[in-house]
Image: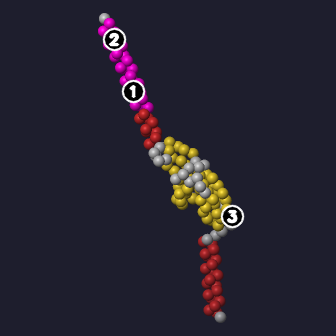
Amino acid sequence: MARQIKYAAVITVSLFFLSACFGPTGKVRIKTDIDNAELLIDGDETSSIGKDFIELEVSAEKHLFEIKALSEDEEWLYYGSEELIIPENATLEKKIYTQSQATEKRIRRLALEAKQREAETLAEKVKKEFLRRQAQEGGK
């Protein structure tokens, strides 16, 4: 009998600790405004995400959901975030919108293109001036 009570106590304590580790949960159905993005929950990469809902089970508490993506040409970084309080034994549905920001690659490319346009404009001015002077000398 004492042995059975001992086992019952061990099982009860074990279940208590397990329930503390695996507290109440809730579900979140989440999507974003772009495809091929990464979802981070509380800073940890969780899964890929896109324009279709994905459903995740998480602990019922406040979480930071972040969306990150890089465009195919690597010129735009997309980012969006939202703090959500996940209700216990319920499903929360959310769409997180992203904002785009130019990457360093895009900034460098645009600067190079601006310098090329400036050089082409200067070359055209030099050419016109050369032709004007040549015409003046030919008329003398």
Name the one closer to the observer, 69 or 52. Answer: 52
Label 3 neighbourhood size at 10 Å, few (<14), some (14-19), many (20+)? few
Amino acid at circle 2: Ala
Amino acid at circle 1: Glu
Where residue 135 is drawn, which disc sits there?
2
> Where does the image place residue 40, in percent across and percent down from the top left?
55, 57
Q: Does the stretch in magenta take in 133? A: yes
Q: Which residues make up the magenta segment?
A: 114-139
Determine the residue positioned at 31% across, 5% down: 140
Q: CA separation, marks 3 and 2?
A: 84 Å
Give the number of marks. 3
Q: Which sits earlier in the primary sequence, circle 3 or circle 1? A: 3
> Where does the image place residue 6, in percent across and percent down from the top left?
62, 88
Q: SS at mark 3? A: loop
Label 1 neighbourhood size at 10 Å, few (<14), some (14-19), many (20+)? few
Q: SS at mark 1? A: helix
Residue placed under numbered mark 3 in the picture: 90
Amino acid at circle 3: Ala
Vertical order, 56 against 117 (above or below):
below
Q: CA separation, marks 1 and 2?
A: 22 Å
> Where does the image place residue 139, in percent across and percent down from the top left?
32, 7
Determine whether label 1 and label 2 are within 8 Å by CB: no
Where residue 120 is drawn, which disc sits there?
1
